[in-house]
Amino acid sequence: MLVRVDFNVPLENGEVADDTRIRAALPTLELLLERGASEAVLASHLGRPKGEDPSLSLEPVRRRLRQLLDDTRLRLLENLRFNPGETANDVGFARDLADDCDLYVNDAFGAAHRAHASTEAVAHLLPAYAGLLLERELEELGGLLETPARPFVAVLGGAKVEDKIGVVESLAARADTLLVGGKMAEELRQRVGENGNHSQIVLPTDVVVAAAFEADAEAKVVSSEGVPDGWLGLDIGPQTRTAFAERIADARTVFWNGPMGVFEWPRFAEGTKAVAVAVAGADAHTVVGGGDSVRAVEELGVADRIDWISTGGGAALELLEGKELPGVAAIPQD
Ligand code: 3PG
């Protein structure tokens, strides 16, 4: 069988720096092997190479996979995006992938928002099924949109404002409270000001500002209204941390995506840490997605207290925006 996995993982010094996505695919691979697959051809992209870029070879992933699940029936193809046919959703390339395979299993939730040859075109060439990870992701994230236990509190942060406006609107309509931190809070403050009537959106009341975008820059806490000219908001302030933690503690469902500040610099990590601890401690069904938020709960040692850690970044956001994911739509429902 042909199995589309999302092994688009961070590399450091030629080794896999975070194997979460590889481990997340193991239950599906183990099931296929247990049920007698004679060979499972695994296909993934890694990064966004322009042509064949050796620094984005899947070789380090192959080594890590072998440490986690060593079975001669598993064969990992080289980075799909080395072939321009992949992102072009080219049927010819999809045919090459499908060649000699009897079934197609898509377990690459993280790439399901891409209409690419390995996620879309190929699903029309072989009997196509969702893998266990893809299925669970759809249940968990889809469940947030359908019947969340209330109060449903969503927490959004991060820097990529434009990427998240759609999800802000969707969650503002569905959640009881939407807590917004990080860089996107500033832009949203202007938008909310213009449109009014977004009573469920809660923005920071205080921020940690820095004189420069540097880890050791001079920093102080100011009210959100009083950011001095030229200073940069790099974290939510202590008052906001407490307010956000209180809302999270009252929730029955929590979704969190995106850091509250520049989490990789310890002096601006407190807001993100406060949210991570509050989400882990909530007596609620908790779902966390997005690289930095997942890293935060892992570094703080609270990941096992989160009900579902999504492997999807962009895919999770598009799903929560209410968009159809091409990789999911291509799989027959019955
Ligand atoms: C991700 O990491 O979000 C997925 O693997 C998709 O990667 P892409 O944004 O390069 O398509």
Image (cartoon, rainbow, N blue to C red):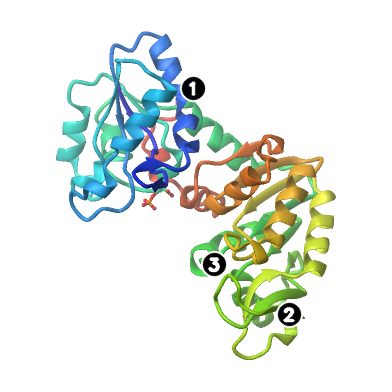
Whole-percent x, y for residue 137 in the image = 54, 37
Label 3 belongs to which residue? 159
Front-most of residues 36 and 211: 211
Q: Residue 147, can we see it?
A: no
Within-10-Å neighbours for mark 2: few <14, some 14–19, many 20+: many
The structure residue drawn at horizontal position 47% and vertical position 37%, both measured from the top left corner, is: 19
Question: The C terminus lies in which quarter of the figure?
Answer: top left
- Vertically, is 86 above or below 105? below
> In the image, which disc is placed on residue 27?
1
Within-10-Å neighbours for mark 1: few <14, some 14–19, many 20+: few
Q: Residue 267, can we see it?
A: yes
Whole-percent x, y for residue 17 in the image = 45, 43
The structure residue drawn at horizontal position 30% and vertical position 53%, both measured from the top left corner, is: 48
Amino acid on which the number 1 mark rests in the picture = Pro
Q: Earlier in the sequence, mark 2 or mark 1?
A: 1
Quick check: 201 left or right of 214? right
Q: Are marks 1 and 3 in contact (CB under 8 Å)?
A: no
Front-most of residues 54 and 81: 54
Q: Are marks 3 and 2 in contact (CB under 8 Å)?
A: no
Number of residue marks: 3
The structure residue drawn at horizontal position 55% and vertical position 31%, both measured from the top left corner, is: 136
Q: Earlier in the sequence, mark 1 or mark 3?
A: 1
Amino acid on which the number 2 mark rests in the picture = Ser
Quarter of the view holding residue 232? bottom right
Considering the numbered disc 1 on the image, is that residue within a helix, a strand or a loop?
helix
> In the image, which disc is placed on residue 224?
2
Amino acid on which the number 3 mark rests in the picture = Ala
Whole-percent x, y for residue 147 in the image = 70, 41
Whole-percent x, y for residue 217 in the image = 61, 77
Q: CA distance from mark 2 to mark 1?
A: 46 Å
